[in-house]
Image (cartoon, grey):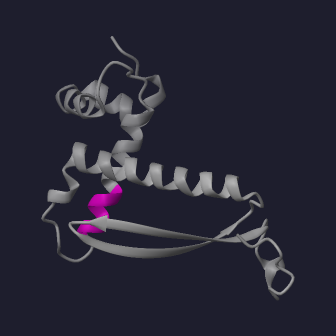
Amino acid sequence: MLTELSWLEQRDKWKGLKGLGCVKSTVSEKGETREFTRYFITSLTDLDEFADSVRKHWAIENNLHWCLDVIFKEDASRARKDNSPLVLNIMRKIALNLVSQAQYKRISKRRLMFRAALEPTLFLDILFDPSSVSPQ
């Protein structure tokens, strides 16, 4: 992590810029090892906070993609033409966000979506005011 940025001529154009970080990762999969290097601009100056932030970011990303695949079977989607993969991905994320905001604690997101498909009033509640949805 680099926090001494006096050499960076346009550093004042990056609001909140305090440091630059680099993360090197090694992934072993199916007998093949690959190395990745990722670079970050950050408002953090502490190395431990930076490392924690990077890990949390990827945990959120991985959780999102897992949900999209498990709930919507996104990896099995055969949409390939034009913008359809992007449009469907955005629609799935919107639906997942709305269902996540619904206050059902004892029901899975997948089951809640199924119930909403069968109950138009529940569907409309989730669509227009997900925070008002509560278990019955």
Q: Which residues are magenta?
A: 84-90
The total number of labels drawn is 0
Q: Where is residue 13, by image quadrant?
A: bottom right
Hey, which residue is sitting farthest top in the picture? 136
x, y percentage for residue 120?
A: 24, 28
Q: Where is residue 51, by image quadrant?
A: bottom right
x, y percentage for residue 86?
A: 31, 67
In the image, 118 versus 62, the foreground residue is: 62
Q: Residue at x 32, y 73 (%)?
A: 33
Q: Is residue 28 above or below residue 122?
A: below
Q: Residue at x 40, y 18 (%)?
A: 134
Q: Residue at x 33, y 53 (%)?
A: 65
x, y percentage for residue 99?
A: 36, 35
Q: Is residue 46 above or below residue 117?
A: below
x, y percentage for residue 106?
A: 33, 18
Q: Which quadrant does the N terminus fall into?
A: bottom right
Q: Residue at x 40, y 39 (%)?
A: 98
Relative to 24, is 21 on the left or the right?
right
In the image, 50 versus 12, the foreground residue is: 50
In the image, 14 versus 44, the foreground residue is: 44
In the image, 81 versus 4, the foreground residue is: 4
Hey, which residue is sitting farthest right in the picture? 6
Quick check: is 13 in the magenta stretch?
Answer: no
Relative to 102, is 91 on the left or the right?
left
Relative to 45, is 34 on the left or the right?
left
Dominant SS of magenta comes to: helix
Q: Which quadrant does the C terminus fall into?
A: top left
